[in-house]
């Protein structure tokens, strides 16, 4: 009897340890899933010089990746950028995306928490009408962004300069998507891509069916 009691106690302790291990694993996975990524995009534009930095942080900044992108005022680079833009425009034109897929992606993007949105613009041109047009255009964009963006820290400023030709932009956006947000966005993009390919195939099939292959009489 004592042996049986000892075995039963050992079995209960093993089961308890097993469930505790499972509970710890589930807790750790839940923390990692709910823990947000920190994606910080900053850019500075001073006339023709552009600097863009992308910073990715995760797990209490244990993972910290910084990706700098620099664009300089070089003619060859300008030509390359124009070519890449043309190729991108052609690809976008060739793709047909359903409106419902676009709205589905936008819905998922709206679920992402925005920590900070910062924009400081200084524009200047000796032509007063151009400066006024840009000033009004940027204010129009700002007005729409105020209604769309809901962030903890929010700053937008634009200052016109009618004396000298000048362009200065200081921009920063800090978003905190969770792993669930990222998975949902990827799902929405994959569905949109799948539907786009389906539409493309149907269009090709329709174009091929438009060709009349029937033989009309003897042309000999």
Image (cartoon, rainbow, N blue to C red):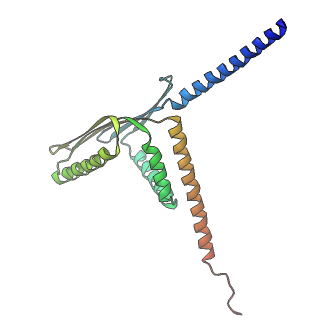
Viewer-side residue, 204 vs 32: 32
Q: Is residue 2 left or right of residue 99?
A: right
How many marks the image carries: the answer is 0
Residue furthest to the front in view is 1
Provide residue 12's location: percent of width, then percent of height: 73, 16
Residue occupying image coordinates x 50% and y 29%: 35
Residue occupying image coordinates x 65% and y 19%: 20
- Name the quadrant containing residue 109: top left
* Image quadrant containing the C terminus: bottom right
Q: Is residue 143 left or right of residue 17?
A: left
Viewer-side residue, 135 vs 15: 15
Provide residue 2's location: percent of width, then percent of height: 82, 6
Instruction: Report whether residue 136 is seen.
Output: yes
Provide residue 196's location: percent of width, then percent of height: 55, 58
Residue occupying image coordinates x 60% and y 77%: 210
Residue 124 vs 205, above or below: the answer is above
Instruction: Report whether residue 219 is seen.
Output: no
Q: Is residue 201 left or right of residue 99?
A: right
* Image quadrant containing the N terminus: top right
Residue furthest to the top in view is 2
Residue 211 vs 142, above or below: the answer is below
Viewer-side residue, 178 vs 1: 1
Provide residue 4's location: percent of width, then percent of height: 83, 11
Q: Is residue 15 left or right of residue 199?
A: right
């Amino acid at each position: 009897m004592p042996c049986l009691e000892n075995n039963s106690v050992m079995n209960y302790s093993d089961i308890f340890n097993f469930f505790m291990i499972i509970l710890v694993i589930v807790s750790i996975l839940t923390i990692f899933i709910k823990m947000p990524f920190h994606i910080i995009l900053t850019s500075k534009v001073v006339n023709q010089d552009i600097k863009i930095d992308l910073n990715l942080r995760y797990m209490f900044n244990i993972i910290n990746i910084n990706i700098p992108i620099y664009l300089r005022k070089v003619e060859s680079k300008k030509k390359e950028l124009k070519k890449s833009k043309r190729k991108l425009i052609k690809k976008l034109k060739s793709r047909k995306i359903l409106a419902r897929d676009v709205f589905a992606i936008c819905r998922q993007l709206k679920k992402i928490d925005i920590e900070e949105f910062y924009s400081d613009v200084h524009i200047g041109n000796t032509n007063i009408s151009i400066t006024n047009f840009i000033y009004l255009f940027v204010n129009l964009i700002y007005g729409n962004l105020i209604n769309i963006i809901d962030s903890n820290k929010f700053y937008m400023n634009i200052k016109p300069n009618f004396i000298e030709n000048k362009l200065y932009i200081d921009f920063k956006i800090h978003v905190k998507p969770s792993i669930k947000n990222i998975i949902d966005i990827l799902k929405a993009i994959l569905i949109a891509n799948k539907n786009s390919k389906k539409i493309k195939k149907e269009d090709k099939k329709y174009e091929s069916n438009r060709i009349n292959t029937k033989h009309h009489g003897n042309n000999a």
